[in-house]
Image: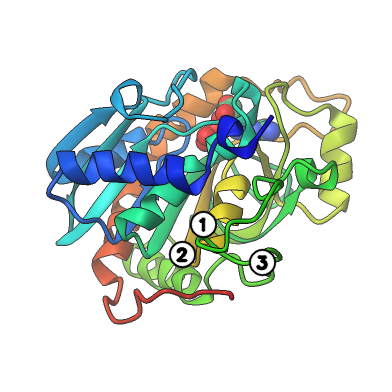
């Protein structure tokens, strides 16, 4: 299969970006991705302009409950934003380059900063359901098996062949999250840790959770990392935060069972606080610091 049939080629992304630029006046500098059950964040955008994924050229369809499947343009706290109300996952059957196509489209739209959220299982025993975890680093398990969104020919118009990932999660944005959480009285439930991505859709076994915890993972999920890799490759700065929607089961005597209903329910309960935290961060983004951090 050629790269253009897999997805994410420059030409394909350009077509999508040009279509969007023709259909909206908004010129976003901030991109937001809403995780499972966290879509309400997009409802905060003023003067929203909504495009269903099925109407956008080259966009895949959202198939997961809790992911509305639309792109919302608008203004959040005075900043022009584009928000994915629902993301794509490997387990939906999309090629990994298709899952991450929106990041390249956002880059071509002029986005400088990406803010991503997700729902994740808590591996760290100190974490409680409902905690927020600022992602400081990731473990890309599919990447170990060669499943990486940058596989295939590199297009220098997006970024370099071998992008560095040791600064994937922007230090200043992480600090901003802690500062804002302090002001909002959220510090008690704002943690910082390592997010481990798996392909899904099956949740982990007890042995897998134990292994991931020993490997250094604080939370486990099925998204975000692929988006971050592509966004960083293209020079956008990234911030990502997990809602600990359930505890990863690590004890053979436990009666707990991971399930998507609990994930969505925790999202519902914490949506408001997530919205306040993220929107206050957006308000504080310094336009001058919103420069390309290209890793070339
Ligand atoms: O898009 P995110 O990572 O928030 O979604 C998580 C992972 C699975 O898609 C789903 C499992 O409940 O939630
Ligand atoms: N892999 C994985 N993804 C999740 N998303 C929300 N909770 C979980 C979980 O426990 N495991």
- Residue 128 occupies which quadrant of the picture? top right
* Residue sitting nearer the eye, 195 or 271: 195
First-in-chain label (3 vs 1):
3
Left/right of residue 198 with respect to residue 214 in the rendered view: left
Residue 154 x, y percent position in the rendering = 64, 56
Residue 99 numbered mark, or none: none
Left/right of residue 241 with respect to residue 199 in the rendered view: left
Ligand 1, what quadrant? top right
Give the alpha-carbon distance from disc 2 to disc 1, as whole Å: 5 Å
Residue 250 x, y percent position in the rendering = 82, 35
Residue 163 numbered mark, or none: 3
Q: Is residue 238 above or below residue 36?
A: below
- Residue 159 occupies which quadrant of the picture? bottom right
* Residue sitting nearer the eye, 191 or 98: 98
Residue 236 numbered mark, or none: 2
Task: Say if residue 82 shows up in the picture.
Answer: yes
Q: Is residue 72 above or below residue 28?
A: above
Q: Residues within 10 Å of mark 3 (few under 14, many from 20)?
A: some
Q: Residues within 10 Å of mark 2 (few under 14, many from 20)?
A: many
Residue 223 x, y percent position in the rendering = 59, 39
> Contact (CB < 8 A) between labels 2 and 1?
yes
Left/right of residue 160 with respect to residue 203 in the rendered view: left
First-in-chain label (3 vs 2):
3
Q: Which residue is mark 1?
A: 231
Residue 121 x, y percent position in the rendering = 65, 38
């Amino acid at each position: 299969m050629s790269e253009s049939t897999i997805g994410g080629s420059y030409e394909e992304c350009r077509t999508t970006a040009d279509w969007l630029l023709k259909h909206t006046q908004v010129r976003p500098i901030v991109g937001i991705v809403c995780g499972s059950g966290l879509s309400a964040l997009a409802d905060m955008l003023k003067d929203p302009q909504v495009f269903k994924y099925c109407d956008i050229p080259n966009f895949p369809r959202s198939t997961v409950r809790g992911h509305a499947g639309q792109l919302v343009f608008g203004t959040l706290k005075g900043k022009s934003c584009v928000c994915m109300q629902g993301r794509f996952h490997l387990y939906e059957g999309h090629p990994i380059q298709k899952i991450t196509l929106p990041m390249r489209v956002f880059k071509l739209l002029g986005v400088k900063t990406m803010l991503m959220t997700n729902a994740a299982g808590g591996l760290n025993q100190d974490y409680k359901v409902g905690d927020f975890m600022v992602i400081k680093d990731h473990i890309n398990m599919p990447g170990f098996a060669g499943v990486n969104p940058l596989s295939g020919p590199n297009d220098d118009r997006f970024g370099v062949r071998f992008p560095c990932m040791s600064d994937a999660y922007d230090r200043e944005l992480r600090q901003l999250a802690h500062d804002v959480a302090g002001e909002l009285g959220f510090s008690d439930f704002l943690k910082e840790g390592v997010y481990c991505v798996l392909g899904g859709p099956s949740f982990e076994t007890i042995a897998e959770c134990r292994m991931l915890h020993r490997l250094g993972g604080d939370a486990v999920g099925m998204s975000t990392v692929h988006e971050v890799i592509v966004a960083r490759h293209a020079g956008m700065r990234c911030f990502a935060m997990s809602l600990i929607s359930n505890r990863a089961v690590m004890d053979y005597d436990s009666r707990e069972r991971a399930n998507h209903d609990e994930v969505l329910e925790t999202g519902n309960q914490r949506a408001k606080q997530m919205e306040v935290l993220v929107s206050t961060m957006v308000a504080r983004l310094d336009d001058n610091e919103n420069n390309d951090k290209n890793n070339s």
